[in-house]
């Protein structure tokens, strides 16, 4: 009975927080986005003006080599709702998202990119769904004509393959753009792994979720930092982090090849017994050697992908290292230096 009462009180408290004047944290990872950050801040401030909720902007500078950090610092000095977390080097977008969630303090957290391909106008719709009782509200891309044909094709293939081989299902045509309730954020923060595929983690924690469809526009400024090679490695992280099917698949392939090899060897022995000594051809022998050698190398490579991630997890190095945090404190400018921040 006490458990039921506690659950009812918890639900009542969450509903009250959502209905009153909640604080919404907007987490925006940045890497060489000097051309976009000022326009992004201006657009966000116009979009949320007059809303019945407070907003904090948490920028994570992922070791940018352009003027991104300098521009974010200036913006943080002007606008007290802005906080800037600067990494000591480039740790990748997944680490930047992790740092943003670690430092966001809002009742709900919105993750979005600064290139404005995640329309800020959708935030109000996210909050409305959140107030209806959903813990996760994600943007579902209805129209991706702004992306290249190659990117649309590879993204569609990735989502379909991932959802077939993984026990965790990611909604198709969704990115990182989403709103998460505080309890969802705290659950994700508690996950200890170092090799982080955030889309998978967002889906893995579960909770009541709903999609809001939108049309993905073109970038407002700057260029995408993801080339084909980085996208390939990103997809590989997703497959290895959330599925053991590649390992199991090669066990089956090895078994089939062993069976076929046994049949072929039996046929050679039988033919030799019937027709006499058999002289195998050089070409066929070399072909078999190269084929089986390639199979072995591929299987060792797949094992290596899993072992390398075990290696990273065992070392337990920090997910990211913070160089500086820029923020306002009691209305005064405050620069904070932190070292080696991780959980």
Image (cartoon, grey):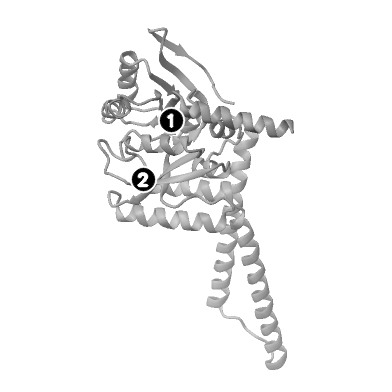
**For the C terminus, which image quadrant?**
top right
Q: Nearer the viewer, residue 326 or 272?
A: 326
**For the N terminus, which image quadrant?**
top right
| Residue 180 x %, y % | 49, 35
Q: Mark 1 points at which residue?
A: 90
Q: Say which mark, if any, is on residue 227.
A: 2
Residue 269 in view in this figure: yes
Q: Nearer the viewer, residue 68 or 8?
A: 8
Q: Is mark 2 on a helix, strand or loop?
A: loop
Residue farthest bottom in this picture: 275
Q: Earlier in the sequence, mark 2 or mark 1?
A: 1
Q: Say which mark, if any, is on residue 284.
A: none
Is 282 on the left or on the right of 56, as rendered?
right
- What is the distance, in whole Å, between disc 2 and disc 1 at their CAs? 16 Å
Residue farthest right in this picture: 1
Q: What element carries label 1?
A: loop
């Amino acid at each position: 009975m006490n458990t039921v009462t506690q659950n009812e009180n918890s639900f009542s408290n969450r509903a009250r927080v959502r209905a009153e004047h909640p604080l919404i944290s907007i987490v925006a990872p940045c890497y060489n986005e000097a051309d976009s950050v000022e326009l992004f801040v201006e657009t966000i401030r116009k979009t949320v003006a007059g809303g019945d909720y407070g907003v904090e902007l948490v920028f994570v500078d992922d070791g940018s080599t352009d003027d991104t950090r300098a521009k974010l610092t200036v913006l943080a000095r002007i606008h007290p709702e802005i906080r800037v977390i600067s990494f000591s080097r480039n740790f990748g977008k997944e680490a930047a998202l992790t740092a943003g969630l670690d430092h966001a303090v809002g009742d709900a957290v919105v993750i979005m990119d600064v290139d404005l391909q995640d329309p800020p106008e959708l935030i109000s719709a996210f909050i409305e769904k959140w107030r209806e009782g959903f813990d996760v509200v994600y943007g579902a891309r209805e129209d991706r004509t702004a992306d290249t044909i190659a990117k649309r094709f590879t993204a569609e293939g990735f989502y379909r393959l991932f959802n077939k081989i993984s026990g965790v299902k990611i909604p198709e045509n969704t990115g990182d753009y989403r709103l998460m309730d505080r309890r969802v954020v705290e659950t994700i923060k508690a996950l200890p792994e170092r090799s982080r595929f955030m889309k998978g983690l967002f889906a893995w924690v579960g909770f009541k979720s709903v999609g809001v469809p939108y049309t993905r526009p073109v970038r407002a400024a700057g260029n995408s930092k993801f080339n084909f090679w980085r996208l390939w490695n990103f997809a590989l992280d997703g497959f290895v982090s959330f599925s053991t099917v590649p390992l199991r698949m090669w066990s089956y392939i090895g078994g089939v090849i062993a069976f076929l090899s046994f049949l072929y060897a039996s046929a050679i022995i039988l033919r030799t017994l019937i027709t006499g000594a058999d002289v195998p051809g050089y070409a066929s022998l070399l072909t078999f050697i190269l084929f089986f050698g390639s199979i072995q190398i591929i299987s060792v490579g797949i094992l290596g992908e899993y072992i390398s991630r075990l290696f990273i997890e065992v070392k337990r190095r920090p997910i990211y290292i913070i160089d500086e945090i820029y923020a306002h404190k009691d209305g005064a400018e405050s620069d904070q230096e932190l070292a080696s921040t991780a959980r």
